[in-house]
Image (tube, coloured by chain):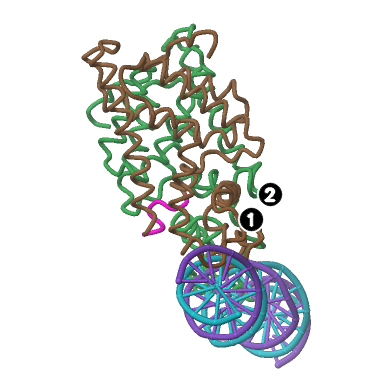
Chain colours: A brown, B green, C cyan, D purple
Amino acid sequence: MGRPTAFDREQAIDDIMNIMWDEGYEASSVKAISEKLGITRSSFYNAFGSREELFKEVLMHYAEQSPDYALALATPPIDVKLLFTLVFREACAARASDKDGRGCLGINSVTELCNRDEKLTPLLEELILGNIKRIETILTWGVESKELPRSLDTHGTALSLKALLVGLNVMCKAVREEEELWLAAKTTLSALDMFEEPPANS
Amino acid sequence: MGRPTAFDREQAIDDIMNIMWDEGYEASSVKAISEKLGITRSSFYNAFGSREELFKEVLMHYAEQSPDYALALATPPIDVKLLFTLVFREACAARASDKDGRGCLGINSVTELCNRDEKLTPLLEELILGNIKRIETILTWGVESKELPRSLDTHGTALSLKALLVGLNVMCKAVREEEELWLAAKTTLSALDMFEEPPANS
DNA sequence: ATTATTTTGTACATATGTGTACAATTGAGG
DNA sequence: CCTCAATTGTACACATATGTACAAAATAAT
């Protein structure tokens, strides 16, 4: 009960994600966000509490629509090389197709805030470390299913793949052609023996 | 002639580099920089013109002391694999030894400003693209000297190496141990056949 | 219809930030 | 010593930004 909110909270989270993606976290002041949403700061504080709390929500929302979300969703049994191939191909396509060259909101936030904003650092650290662990888990599935050799250094390979993904997500700001990004990705994937030609329909 | 400046300009550039490295470009307001240097904004504007002009100077200064400066200095004939091995090893060491986990000022600036700040975007774009070209040039030296096979895809490998370097420079904010960073680097370098065990004294 | 509850609008006090203007200061050269 | 030229200090006029406080508005439940 009580007076209903005059705006759609879900829609607002998506809008705010785009504002922060466009401008960065610190440049997305409560004033600026509120004005762009057409609400008052009063309503902002009432609905979201603080920018920090809001950011956590925004980052969750971003993760669920990011090009590497397939890594979070995957469950064994799965063709590991093909999964990585498709995820990296999709990442290159997504980054290149963004006309504004905004890169990745998660990685942008890590460089802007990690080890700077005391409250948000743990979250962003975990964004990276959790992702590395996740990749390592997926690699162990590949070893267990015999797709990958038992000799594989899953930890080293996970770190290597994450460095590639992060690198692409930043490099895409200057390297705007999908073919170039994909060449970077495919060269590393092939060298690591993690590339598998996808079937024609994907 | 005229009244002499009350501060050392060279020292100021180095101080400002560290302020921008610590806090980021936008957070390094003219007010904040001036106060930290102990000068007035008046003196700031007089000495540096604008924050943009200053940033270009700061970035030059940074480049000359960054861990991958060896790539800019290298001339043929040179052991290419060893050069890349040493540069990446030095990059991992430098990033891990920074207690504040600030990453790379150049890459931080690319994510913060490239495609956002209209005036600085060309400079930052060139920082990335020029570096890729430079790596490719060095790779061609390796092919010409027969150290590397003629079949090598120098462009793809250059993109791959740059993605690795950029990735490490961001990942180091969350992955703080040198051994972990180096494992990421060495795994990729080895896969690309760009790793060469350095002699004991380096 | 009245009450309870929540959102929304407006205002306050304060801090940061920009760029410019102009006078005061300082030191070298004539 | 005095003038020139550059730096420095102070002030102005704004715009942005934060967090809080409290009254006004809008709805649901009684």
Residue drawn at (49%, 7%) of the image: B150
Range covered by the magenta-colored residues = A112-118
What type is the residue that disc 1 sits on? Glu
Mark 1, residue position: B52
Residue drawn at (65%, 50%) of the image: B117
Residue A167: horizontal and vertical position, in percent?
46, 33
Residue B195: horizontal and vertical position, in percent?
34, 21
Q: Is residue A140 above or below residue A145?
A: below
Residue B181: horizontal and vertical position, in percent?
31, 35
Viewer-proximal residue, A17 or A112? Answer: A17
Q: First in sequence, mark 1 or 2: give its number.
A: 1
Q: Quadrant of residue A201?
A: top right
Numbered mark located on residue B119 in the image: 2
Residue A39: horizontal and vertical position, in percent?
63, 63
Q: Is residue D30 above or below residue A69?
A: below
Secondary structure under the numbered disc 1 in the rendered image: helix
Q: Name the dominant secondary structure of the magenta segment.
A: loop
